[in-house]
């Protein structure tokens, strides 16, 4: 048995969470009305690991919607203010599409000039992923490189897979293994448990029916169809509200604002999530706007994800989570756009 693994009974998940909470801040998916949201797990709160997707991806714990960068005071200079972690944060229940998105984030915020705010959070974060077993009609993770219902040896500190009345827990890092050192919670995994996991993954793969067409030649396909009439048709539906980017696990754009106190003596520099779908996003000095038209903004999101991202970061900017389809108020679906451009029949 190559993979180091143990078994956790489902009846003991909350006990495990409570033990982890003694030395960590633990976040997990919790059902609220019709959706799931990642929240801090407090005593008595039930975590739900059998879920399809959360509305806002767990990237918010690494790249918050609003984050203070600098505090400044008149005649007293300025100081950077990265978050101080008294204890590490555990994100429990991260789906493979979101874990893969965090790997993409590592590329974006890494490189020659790493973002100190992001890496401060990233280095204080433990990822407990969970193999997806309940995809829906909007999931298309099987179309994309390194995505899918489970993870293969990277992208997690621990990986849980539902195998009936228990979870198979695979170890991905030393930090993850330290979260398994609690007596009475875990049992040794066997080859039978491993086979149960493999069978579960194969069954889940067959459930994922939605696809992006012609992925291997997608860059050239898009370049050759920039003026296709389908774009104009879809633009008439688009509200340019930015929902698709705000719920996306890989979108990373932000703007920076200075907020002065009324006393004019001190203030803060804050970065806030932004969206390429908003009309002023590409506006520069003197009012020039490089993507003033709605069609240009709609196309930019899809072209950036599936063509230009590869040129920038060496990978695609989509993990097939389906959030942009699920939460778009205009029912815009980029998989159907590409299929219609190719000439396939799509849903009415």
Image: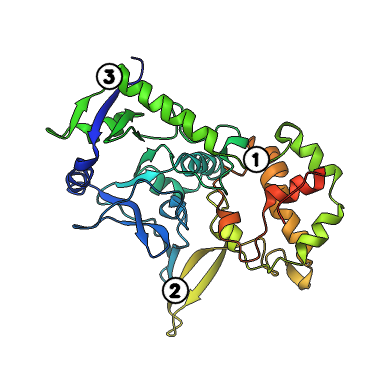
User: Closer to the camera: disc 3 or disc 2?
Assistant: 3
Report the coloring of the rendering. Answer: rainbow
Point out the frontmost of discs 2 and 1.
1
Q: Is residue 147 visible?
A: no
Report the side of 75 relative to 242 (left or right): left
Quadrant of the image containing the C terminus: bottom right
Q: Secondary structure at mark 3?
A: loop
Q: Residue at x 61, y 66 (%)?
A: 329
Can you name the residue that lies furthest to the left here? 183
2 and 1 marks in contact (CB < 8 Å): no
Q: What is the crowding at mark 2: few (fewer than 14 residues within 10 Å), some, or many (at least 20)? A: some
- Which residue in the structure is indicated by mark 3? 190
Say which quarter of the image contains residue 343.
Answer: top right
Q: Identify the residue shown where x is 52% and y is 50%.
A: 249
Q: Is residue 323 visible?
A: yes
Could you say which is closer to the camera, residue 253 or residue 341? Answer: 341
Q: Residue furthest top?
A: 1
The mark found on residue 267 in the picture is: 2
* Disc sitting over residue 211 in the figure: 1
Horizontally, residue 236 falls left or right of residue 36, namely right
Residue 268 image point, x, y percent: 45, 70
| Placement of the N terminus among the 4 image quadrants | top left
Residue 343 or 311: which is nearer the viewer?
343
Please tell me whether residue 331 is drawn above or below residue 22 in the rendered image.
below
| Residue at the image point whose x is 22% and y is 33% from the top | 180
Whether tag 3 and tag 2 are in contact, CB under 8 A, the answer is: no
Q: Which mark is residue 186?
A: none
Looking at the picture, how far across and down is residue 340, in whole percent?
78, 48
Q: Is residue 258 above or below residue 161?
A: below
Mark 2 or 1, nearer chain start:
1
């Amino acid at each position: 048995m190559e993979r180091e693994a143990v078994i956790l009974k489902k009846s003991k998940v909350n006990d495990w969470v409570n033990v982890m909470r003694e030395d960590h801040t633990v976040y997990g998916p919790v059902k609220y009305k019709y959706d799931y949201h990642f929240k801090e797990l407090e005593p008595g709160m039930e975590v739900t690991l059998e879920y399809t997707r959360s509305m806002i991806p767990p990237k918010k714990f690494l790249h918050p919607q609003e984050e203070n960068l600098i505090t400044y005071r008149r005649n007293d200079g300025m100081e950077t203010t990265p978050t101080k972690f008294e204890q590490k944060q555990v994100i429990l229940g991260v789906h493979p599409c979101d874990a893969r998105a965090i790997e993409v984030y590592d590329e974006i915020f890494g490189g020659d000039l790493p973002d100190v705010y992001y890496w401060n959070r990233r280095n204080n974060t433990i990822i407990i992923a969970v193999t997806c077993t309940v995809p829906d009609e909007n999931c298309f993770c099987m179309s994309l490189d390194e995505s899918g219902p489970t993870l293969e040896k990277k992208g997690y500190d621990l990986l849980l897979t539902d195998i009936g009345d228990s979870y198979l827990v695979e170890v991905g890092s030393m930090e993850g293994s330290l979260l398994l050192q609690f007596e009475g919670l875990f049992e040794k995994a066997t080859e039978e448990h491993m086979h149960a996991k493999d069978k579960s993954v194969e069954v889940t793969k067959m459930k994922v029916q939605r696809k992006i067409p012609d992925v291997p030649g997608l860059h050239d396909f898009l370049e050759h169809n920039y003026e296709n009439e389908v774009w104009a048709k879809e633009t008439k539906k688009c509200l340019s509200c930015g929902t698709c980017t705000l719920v996306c696990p890989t979108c990373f754009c932000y703007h920076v604002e200075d907020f002065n106190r009324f006393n004019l003596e001190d203030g803060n520099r804050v970065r806030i999530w932004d969206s390429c779908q908003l009309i002023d996003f590409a506006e520069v000095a003197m009012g020039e706007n490089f993507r003033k038209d709605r069609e240009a903004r709609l196309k930019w999101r899809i072209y950036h994800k599936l063509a230009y991202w590869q040129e920038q970061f060496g990978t695609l900017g989509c993990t097939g989570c389906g959030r942009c389809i699920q939460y778009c108020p205009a029912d815009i679906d980029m998989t159907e756009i590409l299929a219609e451009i190719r000439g396939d029949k799509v849903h009415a």
